[in-house]
Amino acid sequence: MMQERGGSTRDWRASAAYDRAMRHWQRAEWADALAALQELAADYPDEPGVQDLIDKTRLRIETDKTLKVRARRLPLLNRRTLFVLALVVVLFGLAWIALGFYQSTIAPSLAQMRAERQQAEIALQAAQALAAGDYAQALTLYDQLATLNPEYPALAEGIASTRQGQELDAAYQEAQAQLAAGQIAEAQATLVGILEITPTYRDVSALLGQIEKDQRLLSVLRQAEDTQAAGDLEGAVLQLEEARTLTPRTERTEIDGRLFQAYLTLAGQVVDQSKGRVDALQHAEELYTKALGLRPQDPAATNPRDWARQYMDGYAAFTAGQWDLAIRQLGLLYANQPGYLDNQATQLLYDAYMRSGDALLQAGELAMAWERYFRASQLEGMDTTTARTLAASLATQMTPTVTPTPTSTLTPAPTAMPEPTATPTPGYVPLSRYKGKIVYYSNRTGSDELWIMNPDGSRPFHIWQQDKAQAEYEKLRAAELRSPDGLSSLYVTKPRNEKNPKIYILYPDGTSRQITEGRGMNYDPVWSPAGHWIAYVSNETGNDEIFLIGADGEHPKRLTKNDWEWDKHPSWSPDGGRLVFWSNRVTGYAQIWLMNDDGSYQTNLSNNKFEERDPIWIK
């Protein structure tokens, strides 16, 4: 069998098909080689060597196909690949350069920015904690900042401020504890120390002010006690009034009681010592009114105030020759207080009855004259002999006799009419004695003359000796133009090349300054008692209105507003909180008006049909 296989082997390799197949292999003609080998396999189907050559030939054919395909695509891939490769190389180079720049420059800068931002945030948080008074938190944050950057610009100042804040807070708490313990002097010293370091620290200034006010209050109260014990009630009242201004509103019950009683006692002394002088009684009335401001409607004050008013009204009517009006007022007083002013009020009532009876007798009104004399004769505490005699004579004269013709007619002779021995003679009371009241011109007597009324418009009365009163009125008006310190003064003149007058201030060094502007006329300036504001009249708006302007010429403010009516002649209240002026609004008559210094609560004080103007609040 082996011999045959060996013989067969030699046979297939010696065949012409094998020989052709090998020649094709040598020339890499694989398809022809495969055809020759397949022919050889047909002759030798069981020969493994032939099949092995066939497999190898097929493998070569497949390999050659693959190499041919790659050889055809290689030129296209090379062009695109070269461009891509070049681009990749360029981009890679740029990326490498960018990476190096980032690592060497940008990354450190970003890290520095992050560090600075972190430090700034910590510094801000620390400043906020300091502002909120959280000093422990502020120091913790500043410590963190110092760890990150010991050279941070605001670090040293922030730490110093925080430590100072801690010290001030500790001192403030100590002062509060001292105040609570009643250690006023120690608290005051502690607060002064705080104020020397930081003048605006919390409410230290207010606390010191309150301590000073409390100390002043105690001092004033002690002085008031000593002054009253010495018999100086007027001085004690002034000191108690000051003490009241130093006392909080919620704690004034005790001081109000003391002041109320002091007002009553002083007013009673003034009345007792007045001898019927109107100026003294007006002072007493003011005291009673102040007492009523503390205890409204208290009869201990209302009754004596009304008695004083009735006497003054009766006196004013008597001096004006208005006998019946005097009788009405003094009759009320007699009914309530018969012996008022040691019977001086009764004497005045008696004289009013007698004067009225005389006038009626001369007018032929015998019955009415008799009634006046009869009433005079009924007054108690008076020598009424004359009244009784005249009443009896008139009664006899008026009684019919048997004969139809009367025997005679009673004709009063000057010698038969006794003059009252205690009739007050009207005298001039200086306007300065009416401090706090309003003096003004009124035509209610038929001609323009000076009158006086209370700031609420009540109790107007006529002033006697008008020549003296008007001279003093002009002095009061001149005083309204001067600054409170008396060094500067207001005046009105026309600026150069202008037709309307403006308001100027003349200073002590002789220089002057224009303080009002605009196209209208500015006049009637008056300086406020505190010196900060100047009220004046201007027709800038087309009609006369009242304005305010600062003494520095700034912040002008309009107070009144009318359609066509005018407001004129302002005058400040003594406390500077209100203004009195005259206006022809509403009624068409010139009337005295009142308003607050901001223009609110404008009120007609006159409320009549007379012409009343040019008020001055007496200060």
Image (tube, grey):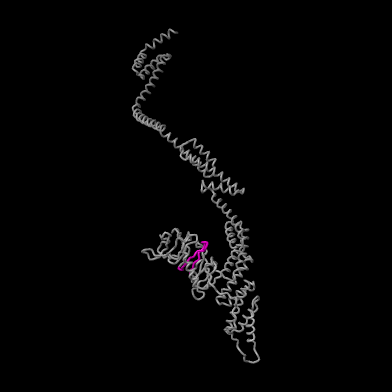
Please indicate, yes or no, whether residue 610 appears anywhere in the rendered image: no
When asked about the image quadrant of residue 7, the answer is top left
Q: Is residue 573 above or below residue 219?
A: below
Residue 562 screen position, x and y as percent: 47, 66
When asked about the image quadrant of residue 542, the answer is bottom left
Q: Is residue 488 above or below residue 359?
A: above
Residue span colored magenta: 564-583
Quadrant, the N terminus: top left
Residue 540 screen position, x and y as percent: 42, 64
Question: Taken as a whole, is the magenta stretch helix, strand or loop?
Answer: strand
Q: Is residue 258 left or right of residue 72?
A: right
Q: Nearer the viewer, residue 529 or 609?
A: 529
Q: Nearer the viewer, residue 231 or 471?
A: 231
Residue 253 screen position, x and y as percent: 62, 58
When asked about the image quadrant of residue 504, the answer is bottom left
Q: Nearer the viewer, residue 407 or 170?
A: 407
Please indicate, yes or no, whether residue 571 appears anywhere in the rendered image: yes
Q: Is residue 203 magenta?
A: no
Q: Is residue 580 magenta?
A: yes
Q: Nearer the viewer, residue 232 or 87?
A: 232
Q: How many marks?
A: 0
Residue ranking furthest to the front: 230
Residue 365 screen position, x and y as percent: 59, 84
Q: Is residue 148 left or right of residue 344?
A: left
